Image (spheres, rainbow, N blue to C red):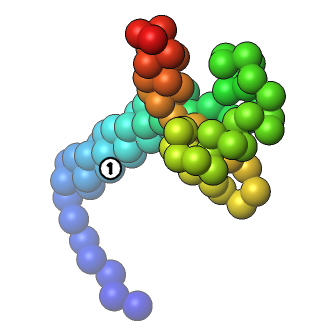
């Protein structure tokens, strides 16, 4: 095992730098997680927002009307795509 000696002041500065870096990383992670999760909706939320059935939602996925993403068997939709679809329907 190799032993390295450093001054106490230098050691304290290193520890403070590491703590600041850790805090910044945790803040960034927290902001990103909460924002990204708020931007997505599941099947139930979309059906309620559009007042449609699960089958109609499935048809919209199949014909490409509504983009989606899947994780395992769970389907998610971007909130902005749902808003765009609602706005498109209002213009008609």
Q: Residue at x 70, y 36 (%)?
A: 57
Residue displayed at 75% across by 23% down: 52
Q: Is residue 40 above or below residue 89?
A: below
Nearer the observer, 32 or 58: 58
Percent coordinates x, y for residue 69 in the rendering: 57, 50
Using a 10 Å C-alpha cutoff, classify the residue at mark 1 as few (fewer than 14 neighbours), some (14 to 19) or many (20 or more).
Answer: few
Quarter of the figure with the C terminus: top left
Residue denoted by label 1: 18
Q: Secondary structure at mark 1?
A: helix
Residue furthest to the front in view is: 92
How many marks overall?
1
Residue 66 at x, y percent in the picture: 54, 39
Q: Out of 67 and 20, give the one closest to the viewer.
A: 67
* Relative image position of residue 81 (x, y in whole percent): 47, 30
Residue 56 appears in the figure: yes
Q: Could you tell whether 2 is left or right of 14 in the image?
A: right
Q: Which residue appears at 32% of the width and 50% of the height? A: 18
**Residue 50, quarter of picture:** top right
In the displayed structure image, the side of residue 34 where residue 56 appears, left or right: right
Q: Between 36 and 89, which is closer to the camera in this rendering?
A: 89
Q: Quadrant of the N terminus?
A: bottom left
Where 86 sits versus 71, above or below?
A: above
Q: Residue at x 38, y 37 (%)?
A: 28
92 lies above or below 60: above
Most extreme residue toward the bottom is 1
Q: Is residue 41 left or right of residue 87?
A: right
- Horizontally, residue 13 falls left or right of residue 83, namely left
Q: Is residue 37 visible?
A: no
Q: Position of residue 34 (x, y in %)?
A: 52, 30
């Amino acid at each position: 095992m190799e032993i390295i000696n450093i001054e106490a002041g230098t050691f304290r500065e290193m520890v403070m730098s590491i703590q600041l870096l850790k805090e910044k990383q945790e803040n960034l992670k927290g902001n990103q997680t909460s924002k990204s999760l708020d931007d997505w909706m599941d099947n139930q939320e979309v059906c309620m927002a559009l007042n449609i059935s699960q089958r109609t939602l499935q048809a919209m996925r199949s014909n490409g009307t509504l983009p989606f993403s899947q994780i395992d068997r769970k389907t998610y939709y971007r909130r902005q795509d749902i808003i765009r679809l609602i706005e498109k329907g209002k213009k008609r």
